[in-house]
Image (cartoon, rainbow, N blue to C red):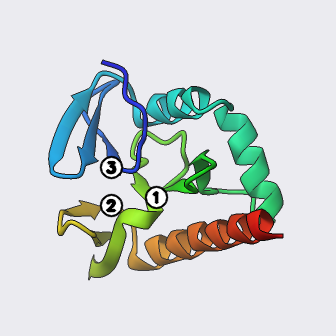
Amino acid sequence: MKYEISKGTLAILPNEKNSSVVYEDDERYIIKETPFQIMEDSCKYFGSTYEGRKDGAKEMLGAEYKVPIVVEDSSNLIVFPTTSPLSDDCVWISLKRVEKIEKIDANNTKIIFDNKTEIIVDSSYRTIENQLSRASRLDLILRNHKNS
């Protein structure tokens, strides 16, 4: 089954070799693709490439690493990585679905989504906070571009 990121997507987590667990609204799916492959496929589905989306985000943010990705333009569907996107441990989080984050310990953070689903990611609170901030800044820049 192919999977395209949508407004319903909460998070995409790596699973066993070459598969992912996708949290979507009140469902969970096992997809036989890595999170990065899902990202690439979703960008293509919405008319661009992952590299093109990444280059655009880098340009707008002046950032080089772990940039958030605008998967779909019209609704500013933005997801951000918890680590290097090519890492086997990378989790992709949908910006607009995050309600809050909580520190578990030095290396783990709980992400609570707008539908009360919770996941724990192997990233520090500071890292997730920075990634949320960066993705929010990208969202703001895009909105300003659309309104000018």
* SS class, disc 2: loop
State the separation of the CA atoms marked 1 and 2: 8 Å
Tell which of 50 and 77 is nearer to you: 77
Residue 102: percent from the left, percent from the top?
28, 81
- Residue at image location 69% in from the left, 43% down from the top: 53
* SS class, disc 1: loop
- Judge depth for marks 2 and 3 and give the one in front: 3
Q: Which amino acid lies under the numbered mark 1 shown in the image of this protein? A: Thr
| Residue that carries the numbered disc 1 in the rendered image | 82
Label 2 vs 3, first from the N-terminus? 3
Q: Are marks 1 and 2 in contact (CB under 8 Å)?
A: yes
| Residue that carries the numbered disc 2 in the rendered image | 122
Please indicate whether residue 130 sits to the left or right of residue 89 in the image: right
| Residue that carries the numbered disc 3 in the rendered image | 8
Q: Are marks 3 and 1 in contact (CB under 8 Å)?
A: no
Label 1 vs 2, first from the N-terminus? 1
- Residue at image location 30% in from the left, 27% down from the top: 19
State the separation of the CA atoms marked 2 and 3: 23 Å
Q: Which amino acid lies under the numbered mark 2 shown in the image of this protein? A: Asp
Residue 142: percent from the left, percent from the top?
71, 64
Residue 115: percent from the left, percent from the top?
21, 66
Q: Which amino acid lies under the numbered mark 3 shown in the image of this protein? A: Gly
Q: Find residue 90 and name its label.
A: none
Please indicate whether residue 63 sits to the left or right of residue 108 in the image: right
Res. 106 visible in picture: no
The relative height of residue 66 versus residue 143 in the rendered view (above or below) is above
Label 3 vs 1, first from the N-terminus? 3
State the separation of the CA atoms marked 3 and 1: 19 Å
